[in-house]
Amino acid sequence: MTSRTPPLLVRCHDKEGMHRLRDDLLSVYTEVYADLLSDPFFHPQRFWERLENYANAPGFSLVTGWAGPDLIGYSLGYRLPKGSRWWRGYRGDAAPDALIEDGKRTFAVTQLMVLPAWRRRGHARRLHDTLLNDRPEQRSTLLVKPDNVPARTAYLTWGWQPFGQVKPFDDSPVYDSLTAQLPLPGSHVHG
């Protein structure tokens, strides 16, 4: 007898949905970021505070992936408001107007994570594509740790382009910044 992996069920949530899923979201986060939790920037409480700030922003969206009753991953983001501090600490050679947000142009993907046991099955791509599907913004941006080669490689394969580096908080790492025009070419959203 063979056991069959349950199909991924994808759900979309707003701010209230995020709050209802707090324990599940933090459980996935602590498993995915287990090796970084001793760094105060990655502490679960700091992470949750950032999520609450994102959830208060315009255009916030959370996409969760479920295998049966278990949350196995999620992605979330929000539209950068006018005068956003997203590009604070930017290092690169972008034109100055590329770093000025008007409140309509850019959607920031702030998280995309899948539990280790569920990786390499296309789940991250599905969460990513569902989050970005039908977004009204012109472009999207995200930050990825330079040493996270699997994630960085996936994003580049999915149509993202390098866009300098950003150190978004005084105590955060320096991240590679990536951008992509919306809609993303080759997006794969399945029901």
Image (cartoon, rainbow, N blue to C red):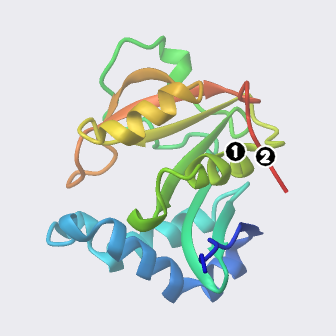
Residue 150: name its quadrant: top left
Mark 1 and mark 2: Cα distance apart in space: 6 Å
- Judge by depth and name the residue closer to the eye, 2 or 120: 2
Pick the quarter of the image with the N terminus.
Answer: bottom right
> Disc 1 residue type?
Asp
Along the horizontal axis of the image, is 137 left or right of 191? left
Q: Secondary structure at mark 2?
A: loop
> Disc 2 residue type?
Val
Q: Which mark is residue 129?
A: 1
What residue is rendered at 42% in x and 67% in y?
117
- Tell me if mark 1 has few (under 14), some (14-19) or many (20+) residues whose alpha carbon lies within 10 angstroms of its own: many
Q: Which mark is residue 189?
A: 2
x%, y% of residue 151?
Answer: 41, 41
The outermost residue toward the left is 38
Residue 138: name its quadrant: top right
What residue is rendered at 53% in x and 43% in y?
84
- Tell me if mark 2 has few (under 14), some (14-19) or many (20+) residues whose alpha carbon lies within 10 angstroms of its own: some
